[in-house]
């Protein structure tokens, strides 16, 4: 049986825009840690010639033929591949005016699942950006114990916890799982095959006409009840960031 794994938004665009309008645009939401644990020998030391091949075959037994020592020229970090990055930091990664992003890119070219370490290592080794890291990925996930390669599938049994979590997104779901319809109906308030409505929708809606088929001022925001939960969640993350107890450690 073929399964499609999907990620889902738990906040509308209006909710996201409303909450993040009061957040500094220089911040980067990126779950990270320097405690590599088993990943040091399993992820960072093996030399993978083509990480794409590894991704295609990761359900099978796969081993690299050579290993390298952990570098000491920079410190390695790992974490969630789901990141929300600022424009200044991305410009730094692209232009790399101190050559750090390019150096790390060369190293991570041969690391399996490099998306779980590249941005994390760049930002925490860059003095001008390491203090902009908010340690969280804004996602609701449930992991097995001990955690496996992917989080558990979410379904209707965890809907209430998921909706109250204040997360902006959630994963992972099986395609067409009934919980996705619950999220559409109760959180996003979107009809089938329609966009999540916002104050910009100016049409007169009905069961056969999408109110968002016509729009007015796209800058008008009308946050819903979920915005308060997201705001509380982001505020908690920012409290940790302000205390500087959870940055690049």
Image (cartoon, rainbow, N blue to C red):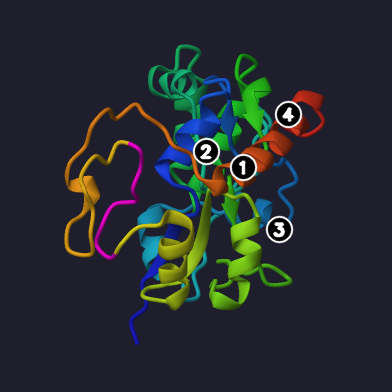
Q: In which quarter of the image is residue 157?
A: bottom right
Q: Decide if residue 157 is on the left or right side of residue 245.
A: left
Disc 2 target residue = 118
Local secondary structure at mark 3: loop
Mark 4, residue position: 241
> Is 225 located above or below residue 176 in the figure?
above
The residue at 65%/57% (across/down) is 164
Q: How crowded is mark 1: few (under 14 residues within 10 Å), some or many (20 or more)?
A: some
Report which residue position mark 1 lands on.
228
Quarter of the image for residue 210 reads bottom left
Q: Distance between the residues labelled 3 and 1?
A: 38 Å
Q: Is mark 1 on a helix, strand or loop?
A: helix
Q: Which of marks 4 and 3 is nearer the N terminus?
A: 3
Residue highlighted by disc 3: 38
Could you tell me residue 195's position as x and y percent? 29, 52
In the displayed structure, 34 sits above or below 88; it is: below
Residue 5, horizontal then vertical, whole percent: 41, 68
Q: Quadrant of the N terminus?
A: bottom left
Sooner in the amino-acid sequence: mark 2 or mark 3 = 3
Q: Can residue 138 be seen in the rendering of this structure?
A: yes
Given this view, does label 3 or label 1 mark the residue nearer the observer? 1
Q: Which of 123 and 170 is in front in this view?
A: 170
* Bounds of the magenta segment: 192-199
Going from N to C along the chain, the mark reached first, 1 or 2, is 2
Residue 155 inside the magenta-drawn segment: no
């Amino acid at each position: 049986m073929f399964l499609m794994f999907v990620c889902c938004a738990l906040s509308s665009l209006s909710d996201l825009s409303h909450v993040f309008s009061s957040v500094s645009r220089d911040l980067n939401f990126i779950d990270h840690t320097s405690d590599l644990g088993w990943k040091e020998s399993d992820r960072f030391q093996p030399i993978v010639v083509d990480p794409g091949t590894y991704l295609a075959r990761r359900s099978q037994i796969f081993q690299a033929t050579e290993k390298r020592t952990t570098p000491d020229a920079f410190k390695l970090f790992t974490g969630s591949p789901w990141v929300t990055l600022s424009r200044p930091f991305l410009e730094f990664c692209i232009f790399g005016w101190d050559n750090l992003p390019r150096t790390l890119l060369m190293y991570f070219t041969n690391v399996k699942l490099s998306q779980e370490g590249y941005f994390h290592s760049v930002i925490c080794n860059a003095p001008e950006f390491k203090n902009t890291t908010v340690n969280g990925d804004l996602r609701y996930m449930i992991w097995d114990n001990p955690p496996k390669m992917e989080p558990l599938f979410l379904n209707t049994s965890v809907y209430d916890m998921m909706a109250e979590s204040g997360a902006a997104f959630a994963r992972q779901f099986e395609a067409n799982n009934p919980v996705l319809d619950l999220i559409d109906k109760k959180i996003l308030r979107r009809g089938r095959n329609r966009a999540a409505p916002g104050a910009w929708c100016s049409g007169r809606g009905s069961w056969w006409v999408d109110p968002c088929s016509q729009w007015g001022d796209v800058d008008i925001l009308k946050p819903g009840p979920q915005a308060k939960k997201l705001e509380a969640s982001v505020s908690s993350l920012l409290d940790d960031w302000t205390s500087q107890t959870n940055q690049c450690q």
